[in-house]
Image (spheres, grey):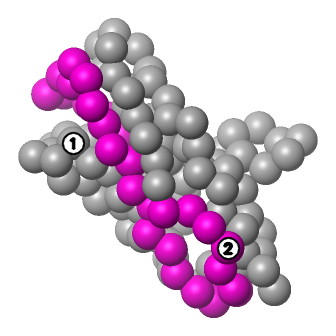
Amino acid sequence: QVQLVESGGGLVQAGGSLRLSCAASGDIFSNTVMGWYRQTPGKQRELVATITNGGTINYADSSRLTISRDNAKSTLYLQMNALKPEDTAVYYCFLQDRRGTYWGQGTQVTVSS
């Protein structure tokens, strides 16, 4: 099993930045995909970005986001810049391996105008 714990969310003014972290622990395989989704009330979760253990990255929107991971620390990061009120959501990290997908509990990001 894998446990994921997000941190770094909070309240920020529009135009500000936040760095989310996701610490993974437990039985972590070497071949994994990690990433971030976000969800607002009444909407489906939407993909934000993913990164493989080899460093291959996919973004829904790369203009303001940087995803990275430290495999030695089993930690995933999401740097978000120039935040907008529409970025307000609960951000969830996930880890996917051959056993399935694991999710964190989510961290709230609120961007005020």
Residue at screen point 22% across, 19% down: 27
Residue 35 visible somewhere in the drawing: no
* Residue identifier under label 2: 11
How many discs appear?
2
Distance Cα–Cα, label 2 vs label 1 = 26 Å
Q: Quadrant of residue 112?
A: bottom right
Magenta span contains residue 87: no
Q: Which residue occupies the foreground of this view, 64 or 5?
A: 5
Whole-percent x and y of residue 62?
A: 47, 68
| Mark seen at residue 74 | 1
- Asked if residue 97 is positioned above or below residue 16 in the image, the reply reads above
Q: Secondary structure at mark 1?
A: loop
Q: Residue type at mark 1? A: Ser
Label 2 CA crowd tier, 10 Å (few <14, some 14–19, many 20+): few
Residue at screen point 50% across, 35% down: 104
Q: Which residue occupies the foreground of this view, 54 or 30?
A: 30
Whole-percent x and y of residue 111?
A: 72, 75
Q: Residue type at mark 2? A: Leu
Nearest to the eye among marks 2 and 1: give it: 2
- Asked if residue 94 is positioned above or below residue 110 in the image, the reply reads above
Q: Quadrant of residue 10?
A: bottom right
Magenta span contains residue 31: yes
Label 1 CA crowd tier, 10 Å (few <14, some 14–19, many 20+): some
Whole-percent x and y of residue 68?
A: 29, 59
Q: Quadrant of the C terminus?
A: bottom right
